[in-house]
Image (cartoon, grey):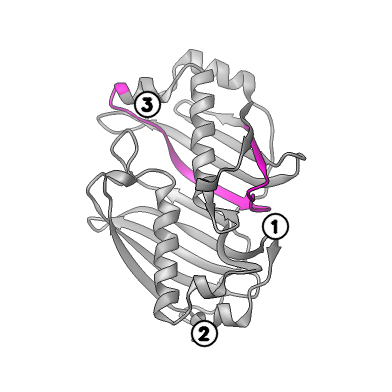
């Protein structure tokens, strides 16, 4: 099902010459809402009933190329597994020529007001099964960890305020990568490495591959800590294990791989200067 059709990249979606990494999360969320409306189990209906609609449980994504100002973006969403209370979706983002931009695989459940996953209505299950197809995708981090303890760890905390929340008064889906990005940029700045000085023909420290598992939602007015454990550093990849906590409880954990991209959005290598802060 095509959920986004030839969307023209807008100025507000850019971070420099390329789109912000959080846009991939945003386009996934928009696409999920379009699919939900098509199978008549809409976000609005669920929010009105105090449920948390289509909460992600697990997410794997790979960025093939970052869109630029000249790009259009389309998204095809395919249900690949429909359970009693969950649905697994594959999101395939392409540019105007049909070339891949990003591929993601995500599992969703809807959380009842009292907690626990709501069973999918039979009519919704039937509609999802009509759209179901086999899509085997190899996405998410592939690099191996380096030597334990040979790279730095760091942590930053954020207050989840009203600009960060969605309709269910939870931290908005696209805010999590923003918090992780800010934590990384703060670490780099403390080591006299500023993205404003590095950015040019190369755009470093862009999300490239990630696997995140969502344990429980992050509520409005929470104090969110983002723990970052650097696991591997190569000329192609900076691999970081992320743990998001509120009130001492793990809410999200996973692994993110950051890459470097040129101004056309294609992957390229980091320079030694960019990687210097991660040296032991």
Farthest-out residue, bottom: 280
- What span is colored magenta in the figure? 48-77
User: Residue at image x 31%, y 41%?
Assistant: 170
User: Residue 61 colored magenta?
Assistant: yes
Question: Disc 2 vs disc 3: Cβ atoms closer than 8 Å?
Answer: no
Query: Tag 2: Cα neighbours inside 10 Å, few (<14), some, or many (≥20)?
Result: few
Q: Nearer the viewer, mark 1 or mark 2?
A: 1
**Residue 58 visible in this rendered orientation of the protein:** yes
Labels 1 and 3: the sequence-earlier one: 3
* Circle 1/circle 3 CB separation < 8 Å: no
**Residue 264 marker:** 1
Work out how far the residue at label 2 is from the one at label 3, CA to CA, in angstroms. 47 Å
Mark 3 falls on what kind of element?
loop
Q: Name the residue under label 2.
A: 279
**Image mark for residue 118:** 3
Which is nearer the eye, 178 or 201?
201
The chief SS type of the magenta part is: strand
Question: In the image, is 223 to the left or to the right of 5?
Answer: left
Left or right of residue 144: residue 229: left
Q: Is mark 1 on a helix, strand or loop?
A: loop
Residue furthest out toward the front: 11
Image location (x, y in percent) of residue 27: 54, 39
Labels 2 and 3: the sequence-earlier one? 3
- Residue plotted at (50% across, 34% down): 30
Q: Is residue 87 visible?
A: no
Q: Work out whether 156 lies above or below 272.
A: above
Q: Nearer the viewer, residue 56 or 199?
A: 199
Residue 208: x and y, percent? 60, 58
């Amino acid at each position: 099902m095509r959920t986004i059709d030839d969307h023209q990249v807008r100025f507000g979606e850019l971070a420099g010459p390329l789109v912000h990494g959080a846009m991939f999360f945003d386009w996934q969320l928009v696409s999920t809402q379009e699919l939900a409306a098509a199978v008549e189990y809409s976000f609005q209906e669920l929010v009105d009933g105090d449920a948390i609609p289509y909460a992600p449980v697990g997410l794997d994504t790979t960025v093939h190329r970052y869109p630029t100002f000249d790009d259009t973006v389309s998204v095809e969403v395919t249900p690949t597994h429909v359970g009693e209370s969950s649905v697994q979706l594959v999101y395939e983002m392409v540019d105007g020529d049909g070339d891949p931009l990003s591929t993601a695989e995500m599992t969703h459940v809807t959380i009842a007001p009292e907690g626990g996953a709501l069973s999918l209505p039979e009519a919704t299950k039937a509609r999802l099964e009509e759209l179901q197809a086999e899509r085997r995708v190899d996405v998410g981090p592939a690099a191996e960890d380096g030597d334990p303890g040979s790279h730095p760890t760091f942590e930053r905390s954020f207050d989840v305020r009203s600009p960060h929340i969605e309709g269910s008064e939870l931290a908005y889906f696209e805010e999590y990568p923003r918090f992780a990005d800010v934590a990384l940029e703060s670490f780099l700045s403390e080591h006299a490495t500023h993205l404003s000085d590095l950015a040019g023909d190369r755009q470093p420290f862009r999300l490239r591959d990630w696997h995140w598992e969502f344990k429980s939602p992050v509520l409005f007015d929470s104090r969110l800590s983002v723990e970052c454990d650097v696991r591997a550093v190569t000329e192609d990849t900076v691999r970081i294990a992320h743990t998001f906590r509120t009130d001492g409880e793990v809410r999200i954990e996973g692994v993110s791989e950051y890459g470097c991209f040129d101004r056309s959005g294609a992957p390229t290598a980091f320079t030694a200067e960019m990687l210097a802060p991660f040296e032991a």
